[in-house]
Image (tube, grey):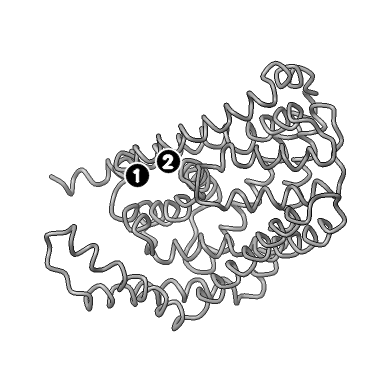
Amino acid sequence: MSSSDTNIKKQDYYAFIKDHKKEIIISFLAAAALIFAITALAGLGDIISALERTNLWFLALNFVLQTFIFLLWALRWKLILDLVDKSPRYSSVLVMLFASIFGNNITPGAAGGEPLRAYLLREIKGTPFEIGFASSTADRVFEFLPFIIISILAAVLILSWNISIWTRLIVTALIIITIIFFSLVVYAGSNQRIAQKITLSIARSVFPFFLKITRKEIHFHDISDKLIFYINRFTTGFTMALKDRKVLIIGVLLSFGMWGVDMTRLYVCFLAVGVQPPAIALVIIYTVGILISLLPILPGSLGLREATLVGLFAVVGISADVVMAASIIDRLASYIIPTMIGAFAAFYYGKIIVADKKPDAS
């Protein structure tokens, strides 16, 4: 468990936002600067002109498809929670999911959502943090199989693309590295001994640093005992979710459905501005866009994903202004509105948690 995960566990959400506001503001400023540069290159007037031609039916369909994705996502997480612990009702799971989306969208590399889900489950429903974290991690792992299949397909299709050999090699290498990384996560999460070895190794390496910044007398033995306890609880819940055949099959099918709907939604975003992107190019670029979103650099990969889409769609003759217009329509449904809803959800739960803790403080 990373230090940021532990912070979310120990603090209420307001405190977590306050403690990390500087990093959040800086990352958003960097994203804004990058988006400004891309907009300047594409031409603000041309982007606005493309947006003015937006087909409202396709715009509405974009929101309908994104809503369907969120509903499937909440259902998948609830299936896992019912297996590893007693799940809240579906509406509560959906609201917590939106709160975690807020956490993902304001932290680089979508790093805040999963621990926030675990924190809310612990504070609102009494679910042990490590069990909640295992459920949210297993939920993400269900996306792995569809991602592998789509990534392999994209790696094969990119060989037929008329692009430089270096671009092919870089994109293919990114796909392979990501597949290897997720394979290691699944292996470590389902293997208690390996998980303990990796976590304790990392903890042992950073322990001297924490001794320097804290005044408390801490023994590594005490920390290692707690880590082993949490790891055992985590791997138990994680393995339980992955080994239950019914949940695994339903979870993977839901993931395939979500990926298919999301890819269709990106296609609809281009249809909304009057452009039909080639299907093969769309699969490749969509996959690369997902890879870029995993990089822990900027919140929501704002700017990075747009730059990637502009560069890759240029290969198939789609101009930067059209790509940026389609990207704005995409972000409206997948990032801006969900982040706003998630902010309300996070602060709603935050107020409940703070109110519940007031009697204890007195």
Q: Quadrant of residue 65?
A: top right
Residue at x 32%, y 45% (from the top left corner) = 16
Residue 266 in the image: x percent, y percent? 75, 40
Disc 2 target residue: 346
10 Å crowding of disc 2: few (<14), some (14-19), many (20+): many
Q: Is residue 209 above or below residue 103?
A: below
Horizontally, residue 253 falls left or right of residue 125, namely right
Which amino acid type corresponds to the residue marked 1 in the rendered image?
Tyr
Residue 212 in the image: x percent, y percent? 18, 61
Residue at x 45%, y 62% (from the top left corner) = 133
Disc 1 target residue: 13
Residue nearest the viewer, comparing 207 with 70? 207
10 Å crowding of disc 1: few (<14), some (14-19), many (20+): many
The quadrant of the rendering that contains the N terminus is bottom left
Horizontally, residue 35 falls left or right of residue 10, namely right
Asked if marks 1 and 2 touch (Cβ < 8 Å), the reply is yes
Residue 136 in the image: x percent, y percent? 51, 59
Q: Where residue 96 is drawn, which disc sits there?
A: none
